[in-house]
Amino acid sequence: MTPTRKKRLMAVILILLGVGIASALILTAFEENILFYKSPSEVLAGDYPKARNFRIGGMVKKGSIVKSTTSLDVEFFVTDYAKDVKVQYTGLLPDLFRDDQGMIAIGQLDKEGLFQAEEILAKHDENYMPPEVAASLKDKKSYLEKGAQ
Amino acid sequence: MLAEIGQFTLAFSMVFSLILTIFPLYGYFTNNNKIMQTARPLAYMQLISILTSFLILVTLFITQDFSVAYVWQNSNSILPIRYRISATWGAHEGSMLLWLTIQAIWTGLVAFYSKSLSTDKIARVLSVLGIISLGFAAFVFFMSNPFLRTIPMPIDGNDLNPLLQDIGLILHPPILYMGYVGLSVPFAISIAALLGGNINENWIRWSRPWTNAAWASLTLGIVLGSWWAYYELGWGGWWFWDPVENASFLPWLAAVALIHVQAVSERRNAFRGWTVLLAIIAFSLSVLGTFLVRSGVLTSVHAFASDPSRGVFVLTLLAIYAGGAFFLYAIRANKLKSQGGFELSSRETLLLVNSIIFITVCFMVLLGTLFPLIFEAMGKKISVGPPYFGSMFFMMMVPMVIFLPFGVLYKWRKDELSRVIKLLFPVFISALIFTALCYWYFSGLNTKATLGVFAAFWVLLSGLSSIKKHSKLPRGLWGMQLAHFGVAVFLFGVSMTEHTDFEVDALMHPNEIKVVKGYSVEFKGVEKKQIENYNAFVGHFVVSQNGEQVASMNPQKRIYPRQGNPMTEAAIDAGFTRDLYISLGEQINDQGGWAVRVYIKPFIRWMWGGGILMMLGAFLASTDKRYFRYAKKLKQENINKYLEV
C-alpha cells in the first residue's frame, strides 16, 4: 500500500472504531435512561413501565394538595381531566407548583397505586406548558367534547 | 414614532444584507473589481442600520413605551432601569434582534480586520455573511418583529419574568450570542474557499483567530449560563443537559474539534477538507440550536412562548445554510487536496483523534437531544435523563484525557512513542502521588471522582513539564497551555462537586440547628420585607464550623406583585474550596416552620474557573503575533499587486 492509502485506511479505521464505540455506549446508556411520559389515564389503564422510573404529567387537581405541617410530605392528585392519580412527594416544591397548574413528576407507581415522586417539575414561566402535558390534555378535552355532543 | 423608525432601519438593514449577498458575489463571478469592492461599505451600512434598530428598541424600553407590544409584554413601570435595558433581549423578539445585531457586528469586524485579504476573497466572505444576515433579518422582520404596536396603548406593562431580572440576563445572552454567531465567520471563510475552489494555509491562518475568539465567547457564555442557573433557579444544579443547554454545547464541541484540526491544516497542509467540514458543522449546529430553542419542539426550562411557524422558518434557514454548504462541499471538496505527508506516530494523528473524539461526543449529545423527537414521531413520549449524557460524556472524556498530554508533547510529522513515554513517565508517577494525597485528604472519594482528580493532575503536570522545557513560548502556545490548564481545573472541580456534594431538605423551626457535613446551620427565622419592585420573605441563617461563625446567610422567597408568582432566591456563601447554598421553600406551619434546602458544594467555583481559563487561553492564542505578521505581509503583497496593476 502507498503511504497515502495507508493513511486513509487508518483514518477510516479510526472513524469506524469511534462510531462503533459510540453506538455501543449510546445503546446501553439509552436502555437505562429513557424516561417514558404517561398521562393519568394511561397509568390507570396499566400502560406504564413497572419497577422503573417514568414521568407522569398533567394538571394539579384543584383543592387536592395536602401538605403536612410536621414534615416536608406533600400529597396531591394529578389529573388529565378524565382520570386522577395520587402523587406523594417529600421535599421542596418548585415555585410555580400550585392548584390547577401543569406539572411533571418523575418517579414510580407503588403497590397501592400511589405515584412516589422523586422529583417534581413545574414550569418556569406562567405562559408555558410542557408540550407533553398540553398534548395529553388536548386529547382528553377533544374526547370529552365529542362525548358531550 | 421611534418604533416606526426602528422598523424602518430594520428593513433597511435587510435590504443592505440582500445587496451584500448579491453584489460582491456577482462581482466575483464576473471578475469585476469595482463591484467586489462594495462588500466592505455594504457590511458597514448593514451594521449601522441594524445597530440603530437595536438601540431604538433599548430606548423604547428605557422610556417605557407600552404602545409597543414587545415592550408592554416584557417590562413595567416599576422595573429598575438596568433590567429595562436587559429586558430588550429578555424574550424572543428582542433576543433575535440581538442575534442579528451581533451577526452584523461580526460582519463589520471581518470587514474591518481583513485588509490582508485580497478583494475577491473578502468579497466572497462578506457575501456569505450577508446571506446569513439576510435570513435572520427576514426572520426578525416577518416572524418576530419587536416594533409592532398594540392598540389601544396599555397603561402599564406586564413585567419581565422575575427569573430574568438578574445580572445573569444582562451578561449571558449577548456573550453567548457572540460565540454562537461568531462561528459564522469560519463558516463563511470555508464557504468562500469552497466557492473559489482552493484553500491554502493563509486562509486557515486567517480564520484561526476568528474561530478562537468565537469559541472563547461561546465558552464564557456557557459558563455564565451555568453560573446563572446555579444561583438563580435555586436548585443548586449547574448543568441539566437541558435541550437548550445542549443547543449551545453542540457547536462548542464541534468548535473544539475545529480549533484543533485548524492547527494541523495551517501548519502541515493536511486535513484541509476536514477543517472545512468542521467549520460547516459547527455553524450548522448553531442554527440547529436556534431552531430547537425557538420552535419549542423540545421541553426545556428556557422555553420561550413558542410558535411553530417560527420553527419552520428557522428550519428552512437551516436547510438552506447547512444543505447548501454540504452540497457545495460535496462538489468542491476534491479540490481541497492536502499534500502534507505525516507518519502515524505524529502530532497530526493525535489532533485527528482529538477531533474524532469531540465530534463523537457532539454526535452523542445531539442524538440524546433529538431522541425524544424521534420517539414522538413513533407516537411515544419519552425524555432522555441526565444520566445518559453524564455517563456517556464521562466515557468519552477518558480517551480525551489520556491522549491530551501526548498531543501536546508529540512532534509534527514524525515522533517516537518511546521518547514521549519517557517524558510522560515522571508526570504519570507524580500525578499518581498527588491523586493519592487527595484521596487521603478528602476521604471518601469514589472511583469516578478519583479518576477525575487523577486526570486533572495528569493534564496539569504534563502541561507544566512541557512549558519548563521551553524558555520562550509564542502566545499561541501559551494560549493552548492555559486552555489545557482550564481543562485540568475543570476536571478537578467537576469531580469534587459531582461526587462529594451534599444536599439536605429539611423542615426547620426558628432557632433550630441542623448539622450538615460539619457545618452547623442555625435558622433564625423569616421576616417580610419590601425591596425594590418585589416583596420578600427573608430567611436568616447563621452557619458556623467548630464553634466559629462562617457565614450569615439570607435566602429569599420573592413575590413580584405584577405577576404574582413566587420566586426562590438562594443565599450562597461562595468559597475557594466550597460553596454553602441555602434556599427557602415555603412556610410549612404556624410555628414559623419553613422548608429549607441546604447544599454543600465543594470546589464548584473551580469548574467555572476552568471554563474561564479555557476562554482566556483561546483569546490569548488569537492574539499570537504570527497572525498579525502574516496579515502585514499579505497586506503588503496586496498593495504591491495593486501598484503593479
Image (tube, rainbow, N blue to C red):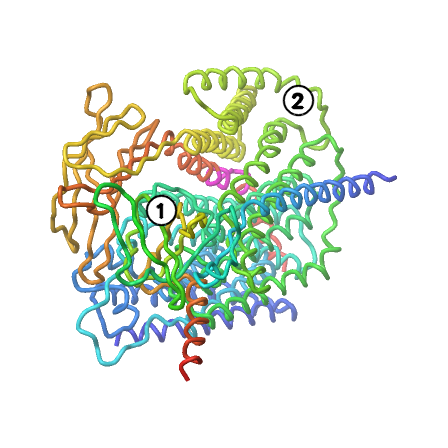
Where residue A109 appears, as percent x and y from the top left, is 45, 50
Tag count in the figure?
2
Q: Is residue B545 left or right of residue B644?
A: left
Instruction: Indicate the quadrant where residue B547 lies.
Output: top left
Question: Identity of the amino acid at label 2?
Answer: Val
Where residue B546 appears, as percent x and y from the top left, is 23, 19
Placement of B631 over or under A63, stated as above or below: above
Q: Is residue B403 left or right of residue A34?
A: right
User: Which SS type dominates the magenta stretch?
Assistant: helix
Mark nearer the N terminus (2 vs 1): 1
Placement of B2 over or under B228, stated as above or below: below
> Residue at position x 50%, y 16% from top?
B436
Tell me the subunit letter for badge 2: B
Q: Tag 1: Cα neighbours inside 10 Å, few (<14), some, or many (≥20)?
A: some
Placement of B641 over or under A15, stated as above or below: below
Disc on res. B229: 1
Query: In this view of the protein, can residue B114 be seen by the observer?
Result: no
Measured in 3D between alpha carbons, the distance from the residue under mark 2 to the one under mark 1, in whole angstroms, is 42 Å
- Name the residue beneath numbered marker 2: B420
Q: Residue furthest front?
A: A112
Q: Residue furthest right?
A: A1
Instruction: Indicate the quadrant where residue B575 lies.
Output: top left
* Local SS, label 1: helix
Question: Identity of the amino acid at label 1?
Answer: Ala
Q: Nearer the viewer, mark 2 or mark 1?
A: 1
Where residue B493 appears, as percent x and y from the top left, is 43, 31
Q: Nearer the viewer, residue B158 or A99?
A: A99
Q: Which residues are magenta?
A: B618-627
Same-subunit check for callouts 2 and 1: yes
* Local SS, label 2: helix
> Residue at position x 50%, y 48% from top?
B385
Residue B100, magenta (yes or no): no
